[in-house]
Image (cartoon, grey):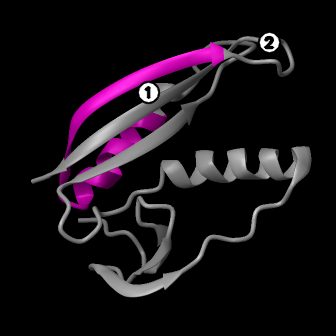
Amino acid sequence: MAETQAGWYDDGSGTMRWWDGQKWTESVQPPAPKTGGLEGMISRAQADAVSGAQPRPAPAGMSYVVLQVVLKEKFFGTGSGNLTELEKVINKQAALGYRLHTITTASSGSGGFGGGDRIQATLVFERL
């Protein structure tokens, strides 16, 4: 059974909490100061997209974990890899003792190169 490595993780409340590899500890640290302007907004969006899909256990006393995964759009060729990405997230949470409870998706237009859609999946996991 794969386990999430010890480290600082968002505990779901926006606070960074130390995960010792087995359980949440009482050690917390405030989030990094926010950078202003467009650069700051882009950095926060990138960090949210990356941290949202990281496996994590539920905070103490809670039975659910909610993760958001930003899925990629394939501009050329085939095979976006979105199903593989979702499969990885689901299997990582399963290894921590959670099963997928609910999954929803939302899409929005993108102003990036070539336009297209940005798809975001929200997954709710329930402790077994």
* Image disc number at residue 115: 2
Mark 1: few, some, or many residues within 10 Å (few <14, many ≥20)?
A: few
Question: Split into 4 quadrants, where in the image is the N terminus?
Answer: bottom left
Question: Does the segment drawn in magenta span residue 100?
Answer: yes
Whole-number angstrom distance, CA of label 2 to CA of label 1: 22 Å
Give the magenta range: 85-108
- What x and y, as percent, mark residue 60? 23, 71
Helix, strand or loop at label 1? It is helix
Q: Nearer the viewer, mark 2 or mark 1?
A: 2
100 relative position to 82: left or right: left
- What x and y, as percent, mark residue 62? 20, 61
Q: Look at the picture and state if 116 lies above or below 52.
A: above
Q: Look at the picture and state if 97 lies above or below 18.
A: above
Q: Amino acid at mark 2?
A: Gly
Question: Does the segment drawn in magenta span residue 27?
Answer: no
- What x and y, as percent, mark residue 69? 50, 38
* Image disc number at residue 83: 1
Q: Look at the picture and state if 83 lies above or below 16.
A: above
- Decide which of 83, 31 is in the foreground and name it: 31
Residue 101 picture quarter:
top left
Look at 89% across and 44% down and name the residue there. 38
63 relative position to 106: left or right: left
Q: Amino acid at mark 1?
A: Leu
Q: Residue furthest left?
A: 128
Look at 48% across and 69% down and name the residue there. 9
- Decide which of 88, 32 is in the foreground and name it: 32
* Image disc number at residue 41: none
- Decide which of 121, 72 is in the foreground and name it: 121
Look at 32% across and 69% down and name the residue there. 3
**Nearer the N terminus, badge 2 or badge 1?**
1
Mark 2 in CB contact with mark 1 (< 8 angstroms): no
